Amino acid sequence: MESYAVLKDLALIVIFAKLFGLVARKLRAPQVVGEIIAGVIIGPSLLGLVSPTPFITSMAEVGVILLMFSAGLGTDLKQLVKTGPQATLIACCGVFVPLISGALLYMAFYGASPWGDENFYRAVFVGVILTATSVSITAQTLKEMNKISTKVGTLILSAAIIDDVIGILVLTFVIGFKDPATKPLKVVISTVLFFILATVVGVISYKIFKKIDEKYPHTRRIPIAGLAYCFAFSYIAERFFGIADITGAYVAGIILCSIDDSDYIERKVDINSYMIFGPVFFASIGLKTTFDNISMSIVWFSACFILVGLISKIIGCGIMAKICGYDLNDSLKVGVGMMTRGEVALIVSQKGLSVGLLDSNYFTCVILLIIFSSVLTPILLKIIYSKDKKETAT
């Protein structure tokens, strides 16, 4: 293929992704859903205008790294510490229940396998996909109802942040265990060593960035240095510790999230992500989605996957909220507020495809889960809050 043909591919991806993204937003669905559908339409499954070439795949990898870096930069560490043990317990239960439920669902359809078998890791990985929470839809709904600063609203947002951190850690372990030659102890040691390094280097890096930020506030060198730092951390995580590169990017974002210009770095990174790398990543998921091997088994699996994905979050987070002392109504708000899925679920799925833990056919399940959870969450939250007495903001 001519080297300049990639320019045609990029033009088509950007135009179609943004067009369908806007349509999705008009229909009150996540914009990323529109971008994925755009990839399906222009990809090999339908029109065949664009193929998932190595160049597109590489750009998509940069896109997912930037997305996770932005997620880390957007983390509020003070809020995380403030909410304390309650949000952490809810997040842990909100990861554990969907993880087990997803794995059992896969085993029910495709058979249980012994520890260490390829099918066993595929089952666990399906559970990992279900652990991710996307709080953007919930946050917007709570904001519209003027409930975002309430005790329950703050708890939901904090638990969602911790939820994603735990989910990324689980992803790291599962990918590490997947290789038959890899010993469990080695995975644990590598992961612990990485986070020790991240802590030590993170403290030093934070102080250096803080000094630079004080000397050259709000200058372009800050986001440029931050971006280089993100790529370096991603490379070190994958190359030397066997940790997913997206984990390295996320950790890099968390390290820099407390400097004064973290918002400025995030805005500059988001420009690149929004204009080119983000659309390429989400469209690439559509490009790799195939309907050739779709069977009734997968159709039934998709229906059960959506049902389990929604209910497991409500049960896991809701029960733990009740144990933490919240009444039934507030516990239900927490459970429903935590059931939305979005970018992180797609990122995890993409990583699973790249390491052979997921077939492209199952992207359809994830996309449908995102659509259903994004539509149902605002509706259910408004119904639950409508039965409420006025809740005073904290």
Image: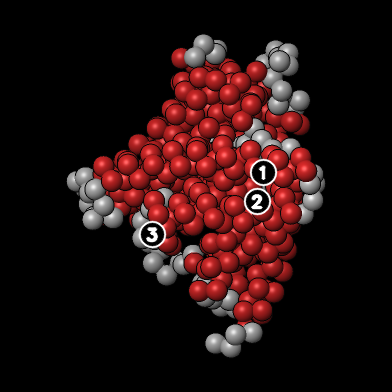
The answer to whether 200 appears left or right of 9 in the picture is: left
How many marks are shown on the rendered structure? Answer: 3
The answer to whether marks 2 and 1 mark residues whose Cβ atoms lie closer than 8 Å is yes
Disc on res. 355: 3
Residue that lies at the very extreme toward the bottom in this rendered image: 2
Q: Name the spot of residue 394 as percent of width and height, x first.
A: 71, 15
Q: Amino acid at mark 2?
A: Gly
The answer to whether 14 appears left or right of 47 in the picture is: right
Q: Residue at x 61, y 65 (%)?
A: 280
The answer to whether marks 1 and 3 mark residues whose Cβ atoms lie closer than 8 Å is no
Q: Secondary structure at mark 2?
A: helix
Q: CA distance from mark 1 to mark 3?
A: 34 Å
Q: Name the spot of residue 259 as percent of width and height, x first.
A: 69, 38
User: Closer to the N terminus: mark 1 or mark 3?
Assistant: 1
Q: Name the spot of residue 208 as percent of width and height, x first.
A: 64, 42
The answer to whether 116 appears left or right of 394 in the picture is: left
Q: Amino acid at mark 3?
A: Val
Residue that lies at the very extreme toward the left in this rendered image: 114
Residue 53 visible: yes
Disc on res. 226: 2
Disc on res. 209: 1
Q: Residue at x 69, y 74 (%)?
A: 11
Q: CA distance from mark 2 to mark 3?
A: 28 Å
Q: Nearer the viewer, residue 195 or 9?
A: 195
| Quadrant in the picture for residue 16 | bottom right
User: Closer to the N terminus: mark 2 or mark 3?
Assistant: 2
Q: Nearer the viewer, residue 69 or 137?
A: 69
* Other residues around mark 1 within 10 Å, as few (<14) / some (14–19) / many (≥20): some
